[in-house]
Amino acid sequence: MSESKITVMAVGAHPDDIEGFFGGTLIKYHEQGHRVHMVIATDGRRGGPNPGTELALARKKEAINAAAHIGVEPLFLDFEDGRLIYSQETYEKVIGACHNVKPDIVITHDANDYHPDHRAISRLTTDAAGVPVLFGDTLMGIGFEPEFFVDITAQVKLKNKMLVEHKSQNPSRMVEMKEVQARFRALQSTRDPWGVNQSPRYAEAFRLYKRIGCLNGYELLPK
């Protein structure tokens, strides 16, 4: 939908969230020449069977490697995984990221997501960003009512390469889950559910955070 070049800021709670929930859309923005930024809120230290500093360092490296596929250097806010709350400190860091990036649109977690870190960064982001905010899909789409879909059929292979960089997170299982969900969203979005044209085959789903002055934010989605 967007014609002119814009700045897109994706905000995820954990090191693999951005790629998993809206990675295909970010790839599409990048391919269309838009400026893409990735902000990762927590260190991911509890996201595995051996939690701690060593895992946090590994996940940071994984996130850097994944973002490199689209030429992005992630911004790490370095909050503790599993302990993210709304506070003066966290708000100042998130609004600082917004001021530094100066996005035209922000994508983050749904406000009703299953994970408390996801819900916390969602609220922090919507309060800090003075621009349209899109909520990405939830894990396996539970409780999420899509309003808009982005066709990522041409981007899904690169999205999977980004996911595979997260070697500590059972990436083959993650790829399988995300592909199933993207196929389901594609079937929801198509005018041709019986598959005559087979387009799109993969899609990511979004809904717009409703507030005055931002109700046309969906126009900033990639073409």
Image (cartoon, rainbow, N blue to C red):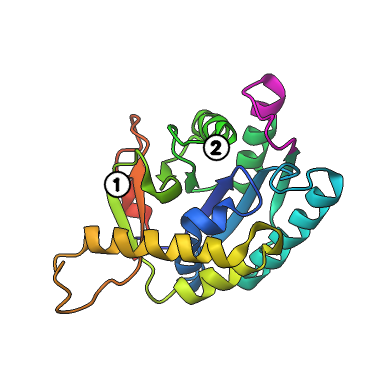
Q: Residue at x 29, y 42 (%)?
A: 145
The magenta segment:
79-92
Is 86 covered by the magenta stretch? yes
Is 117 displayed left or right of 153 in the figure?
A: right
Residue at the far right: name it.
Answer: 54
Percent of width and height locating residue 96 = 67, 36
Task: Choose between 163 and 68: the one closer to the eye.
Answer: 163
Label 1 sits on residue = 146
Residue at the far bottom: name it.
Answer: 197
Element class at badge 2: helix
Is 123 covered by the magenta stretch? no
Image: 26 above or below 12: below
Q: Residue at x 52, y 32 (%)?
A: 119
Label 2 sits on residue = 118
Looking at the image, is mark 1 or mark 2 earlier in the sequence? 2
Is disc 1 in contact with disc 2, using a CB cutoff of under 8 Å? no
Q: Quadrant of the N terminus?
A: bottom left
Q: Quadrant of the C terminus?
A: bottom left
Element class at badge 1: loop
Badge 2 amino acid = His
